[in-house]
Structure formats: C-alpha cells, structure tokens
Image (tube, coloured by chain):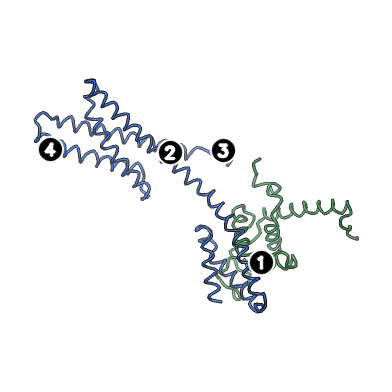
C-alpha cells in the first residue's frame, strides 16, 4: 500500500512523540526545549522527550511538511538567537485534527464499552 | 556543566554525520537547558536518572537514524552499481577485442589483422583511459563526457605520436601511418562509447520515476 503524503489520513496513526510535538506547536511557535517542556507539562511528566527523539521527530515532521522553521522569533530580546523555532503548517494542523478525531472515536468506543465513564454534559 | 556538555557532544558522534550537521548545535543547546533545569535535583539519584534518560534516548534513536541514513545512501549504491556495470562493459569490450585479435593472428585472417592496429590501440588506450576517466569522474565535478574527451585524446595521441616516431626508426617494416590511424579509430571508438553512456544517463535522469 502506498502512502499519499498529501492526505492527512494516510499519516495516521501518529507516533505518541509526534502527536505530542504537534499538539505542543498548536498553540504557537516553539523551539526544541520549549517543545520538550510543553510535552512534559501536558502529559503530566509521563512523556519526557530526549534530544535524539525530539530532533529525529522534528527531522521527519519537516520532511513531511507538517511543520516548518519559523522565520520570526516570538521574543527576540529575551531569547538566544541561535535557537530555531518551529511552526505547525496548515497541513500539520489537518493531520493533528484528523488524529484527534481518530482518538476521539476510540474514546467513544471505550465509553460505549463502559471502560471509561462518559463525560457529564 | 562544561564537562557534561563536552561528554554529550562526544555521545552525539554516534549519530550519522548528516543528522549531526543538521541538529548537533540545537541538541547541545537543548541538553544544556535540560541539564540546567535538572542540576538542582542532582543530589540523591537525580544525576543518574538524568544520564540514564540521555543514554536510553541515544540507544533508541541512533539505530533509527542510521537506518534512515542507509536508505538515503541507497541512491549512492544505485550509482555505484551503474559504475560497476560501465566498468564491466568496458572490460568486456577489451576482452572481446583481444580475443578477436588473437584469433586473427592465429588463423591469419587478414581482414582482422588490418584492424589489428586499431584493436591494439583500443586495448591500450581503453585500459589506461577508462581507469583515468573513472577516477576523475569520482574525484572531480567536471562533466564526464568532457573528461572522457580530453583523457582519450591524450591517451591516444601520445602513444600514436611516440610509436610512429620510434617504430619508423627501429624497424623499416613498421607502418607508422597505420599506427596513427589505429589510435584515431581507438579515440573515436572510446569517445563514442562514452557519448552513448552519457546519453543513456541523461535519458534516465530525465525519465519520470514511478510513484513520485
């Protein structure tokens, strides 16, 4: 089966590290350490990306055009200018949304089987 | 801190060169940030947990990056295959010419012996010229066809002139004109082979590849 790289669905399911990196970038541009911190924060410290995992994933995300290197720095005065910032592309956003929908469906199935409680409205 | 950073840089040598070139500086910056953030907790098991995390990350990601790098290098292997094919082709032509000449001499086939001068030149210039062309194409970035032109011009012209002068002085029975014509034929032959090879390579480069 060939992967059509312009179709978000063809890139699913995402690896956990990739999913969390995209999720971290959905709020705005971040540099490598910023991504690490964001991921550790929103996973409650469960996922701690190492430098190799982080930049390996970044390399693949750049080549798949899910992220790009951002030109401008959010805070040039406070920051080390050698740092590279990364930004989610439109395609990256579509892939992230598709993955979230996929996970939501899985969650709905789990709720249907009463493995987890349904959220109260 | 400085020692830890240097040690981490040494560890990074385990990654493929291309990956290091692209991300080494950033990885070191990230390492520095992580180290600074974790350093206050280095008493007790903090330091060992930090380094265990770094090593585990290295062990998990180095093979993956090398595997991907190897996939990229497959292109180099494909080109190497073509080069080997070209060398085998040249060797086959030379062997065929030698066999033909040997047959001609053994059975005194005059039509082949007339071409003996050309065959001798083709073998001599072919072995030396193709080796030089192969090395120059690998070492330099000049146009391969241009390299072939100048190489075969030199490896054919020099022995043609030298042999024509020497043989006419040493043996009155020698035919300097035939020697020169032989090397001229050899030049045209080898340049023709390289021209065809260049056309084929260009055709392959321009042809749309499947699945892209």
Q: Secondary structure at mark 3?
A: loop
Q: Where residue B194 appears, x then y in whole percent? A: 35, 37
Give the number of the disc on residue B4: none
Q: Where residue A11 appears, x then y in whole percent? A: 68, 49
On the image, numbered disc 1 is attached to which residue? Answer: A36
From what the image shows, is residue B15 above or below residue B75?
below
The CA distance from mark 4 to mark 1 is: 78 Å
Q: Where residue A101 appears, x then y in whole percent? A: 78, 52
The green chain is A
The CA distance from mark 3 to mark 2 is: 17 Å
Specify the colour of chain B. Answer: blue
Q: Residue furthest right?
A: A121
User: Chain under label 1?
Assistant: A
Give the number of the disc on residue B210: 3
In the picture, residue B192 is in which quadrant?
Answer: top left
| First reached walking from the N terminus: tag 3 or tag 2 | 2
On the image, numbered disc 4 is attached to which residue? Answer: B166
Q: Please tell me whether mark 4 or mark 2 is closer to you in this view.
A: 4
Residue in the image at 61% along x and 70% along y:
B51
Sort mark 4 into few (<14), some (14-19) or many (20+) by Cα contacts within 10 Å: few
Sort mark 3 into few (<14), some (14-19) or many (20+) by Cα contacts within 10 Å: few
Q: Please tell me whether mark 1 or mark 3 is closer to you in this view.
A: 1
């Amino acid at each position: 089966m060939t992967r059509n790289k312009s179709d978000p669905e063809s890139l699913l399911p995402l690896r956990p590290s990739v999913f969390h990196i995209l999720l971290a970038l959905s709020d705005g541009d971040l540099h490598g350490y910023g991504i690490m911190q964001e991921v550790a924060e929103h996973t409650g410290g469960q996922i701690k990306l190492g430098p190799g995992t982080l930049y390996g994933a970044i390399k693949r995300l750049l080549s798949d055009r899910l992220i790009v290197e951002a030109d401008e720095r959010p805070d040039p005065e406070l920051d080390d200018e050698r740092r590279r910032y990364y930004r989610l592309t439109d395609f990256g956003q579509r892939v992230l949304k598709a993955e979230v929908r996929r996970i939501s469906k899985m969650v709905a199935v789990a709720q249907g089987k009463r493995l987890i409680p349904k959220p109260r409205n | 801190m400085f020692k830890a950073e240097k040690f981490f840089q040494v560890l990074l040598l385990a990654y493929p060169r291309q990956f290091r070139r692209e991300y080494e500086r950033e990885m070191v910056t990230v390492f520095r940030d992580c180290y600074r953030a974790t350093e206050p907790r280095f008493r007790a098991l903090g330091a060992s947990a930090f380094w265990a995390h770094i090593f585990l990350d290295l062990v998990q990601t180095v093979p993956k990056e090398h595997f991907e790098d190897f996939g990229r290098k497959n292109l180099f292997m494909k080109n190497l295959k073509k080069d080997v094919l070209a060398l085998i082709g040249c060797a086959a032509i030379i062997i065929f010419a030698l066999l033909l000449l040997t047959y001609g001499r053994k059975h005194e086939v005059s039509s082949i012996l007339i071409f003996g001068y050309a065959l001798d030149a083709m073998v001599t210039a072919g072995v030396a010229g193709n080796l030089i062309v192969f090395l120059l194409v690998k070492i330099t970035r000049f146009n391969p066809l241009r390299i072939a032109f100048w190489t075969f011009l030199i490896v054919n012209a020099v022995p043609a002139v030298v042999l024509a002068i020497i043989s006419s002085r040493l043996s009155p029975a020698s035919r300097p004109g035939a020697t020169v014509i032989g090397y001229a034929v050899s030049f045209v032959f080898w340049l023709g082979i390289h021209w065809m090879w260049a056309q084929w390579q260009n055709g392959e480069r321009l042809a749309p590849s499947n699945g892209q």
